[in-house]
Amino acid sequence: MSLPSDLEIARSVTPRPIVDVARDLGIRDEEIEPYGRTKAKVTLAAIQRLEAERPRGKYVVVTAITPTPLGEGKSTTTVGLAQGLNRIGHRAAVCIRQPSLGPVFGIKGGAAGGGYSQVIPMEDFNLHLTGDVHAIGAAHNLAAAFLDNSLHHKNPLGIDPFSILWPRVVDISDRAVRRAVIGLGGKENGVPRETEWIITVGSEVMAVLALATDLHDLRARLGRIVLATTTDGKPVTCEDLGVAGSMTVLLVDAIKPNLLQTLEGGPAFVHCGPFANIAHGNNSIIADRLALATNEIVCTEAGFGADMGAEKFFDIKCRASGLEPDAAVVVATVRALKMHGGIGRIVAGKPLDPALLEENVEAVRAGAGNLAKQIENVLLFGVPAVVAINSFPTDTPGEVEAIKEVAMAAGASAAVVATHFTDGGSGAADLAEAVWAAASSGSQFKLLYPDDAPLGEKILTIATKVYGADGIELLPAAKKALKLYEDLGFGHLPVCMAKTQYSLSDDANLKGRPSGFTVTIRDIRLSAGAGFITPLLGEMRTMPGLPSRPGGEKIDIDADGNIVGLF
């Protein structure tokens, strides 16, 4: 018997009034700003009060093996784990990112979890929520408008038009605007120049909001954003342009974390959504702090595999927040490990290859090298790792046992089958027990590289230690950018690698645990406000395109005006 759709399951539950969820956390009525009955923002003053009054809860990051285009259920596992922890008697919250509208209307769909492990209301979560992403887009594009306006009005800052680093953004996948020429149509329409659009969640403003600790830190970070350089090579910032204050004003509500709930009525904080293959792929520091001040244990999600979101969680987010994780969960599926073992081909939007539905223990073992490497990646940071085997009906005992053997040999503290998709929190109770034990065992957290290491050394360290590469190759544009940023005084910044999520390498076709490869760095971007540099690996794009049959074709309203087709 097939399960109802995610949307049908989400609608089968009557959400608790959000004020009741907040009160259970110790958040006062005057400290929340409701958006209807089922979602609310929490004031920054509440976070300051609660942090002063409460001990910090345990901090758990949920990551994964290198995923397939279908995803391996990491968001679903994060939600299910929090539900499971509540089931076994621990006050637990989930912290996850808000999805971009690009994937929602494209091929991936939403990111509220799935089955009986979801954040609700699912429609609000996947669409506009409280408008944060729109505010981020407006703030970003305001800086772009100020920049071009300064060029139009005789360029008083002496900006070199060929040095402009600042694109425009839109939160829809739209390949046609990846590269464009603006300012056409005569003198009154601005200065003609080539530029680009990127997806809003790839904006530095999104990264800044996710890493800011309070409103004044947000204002300072926005002021430090470098938009271009002058003709004599000096940086031009948002502060120089006089736009940082206005950008901050557009974000005074967006900086407040959003409180929702799981299907089982537990707290869920949804705030920010930087892409993990472009940006740092983690929800906000502010949301995590609020959750940690109001719960015994918090499950936060890092995008894609441990080589992507988790490495950035450790090296960028934890470096900025000063928070130290107590444990990590690595999500794995039988079908993905078979694919990494050379069996079948997974294409989003198409039926699953029948070869992936047949028992093949040897393929699982062959592909499990990827799992072993991702466990090793977590252990590099001194954090205990628990493997969550996200269960599917076609999994066999032999395949599951193979995963457990590889996981334990690689150093995992436990490997547990979880059925949270079909069973909700009860299906993640065993996983919850293992995670609580790991988080109580004593983490020895450490960063991968020091702040004062040269930028090139930081890039090489990530490529060799996390990806398993033999080395790196810096193309001419990357070499030029690296020298520029170090000359400008940004050599102390951490590194946010932009690469494919479908391989440990920079080549999406290299599955499993590849070896003998070199990582190619084609260019490097600066995010001075967010506080990192971004090497662009291979052909990594900052604006996705829509597939031939976008998921948005199925999204509509029914005769009663209800939203249908979300997935």
Image (cartoon, helix red, strand yellow):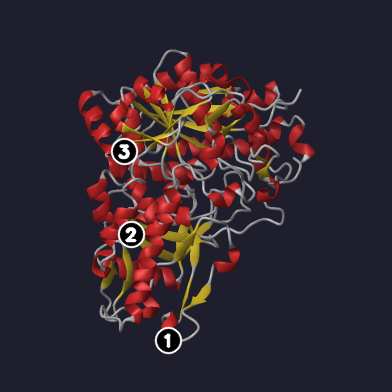
Residue 400: image tag: none
What percent of the width, then of the height, locates residue 300? 42, 34
How crowded pointer 3 is (Cα within 10 Å; few <14, some 14-19, many 20+) is rated as some
Q: Which of 46 and 346 is in front in this view?
A: 46
Q: Which residue is drawn at 54% across and 27% down?
A: 388
User: Which residue is farthest left?
Assistant: 52
Position of 7 with respect to 127 (left or right) is: right
Q: Residue at x 59, y 47 (%)?
A: 104
**Which of pointers 1 and 2 lies earlier in the amino acid sequence?**
1
- Residues at marks 2 and 3, CA–CA distance in whole angstroms: 19 Å
Q: Nearer the viewer, residue 311 or 43?
A: 43
Q: In this view, does 285 lie above or below 540?
A: above
Instruction: Report the amino acid beneath label 3.
Output: Lys
Residue behind mark 1: 187
Residue behind mark 3: 446
Task: State the image quarter where residue 423 is shown.
Answer: top right
Tell me the mark number nearer the camera, choosing from 1 and 2. 1
Residue behind mark 2: 455
How crowded pointer 1 is (Cα within 10 Å; few <14, some 14-19, many 20+) is rated as few
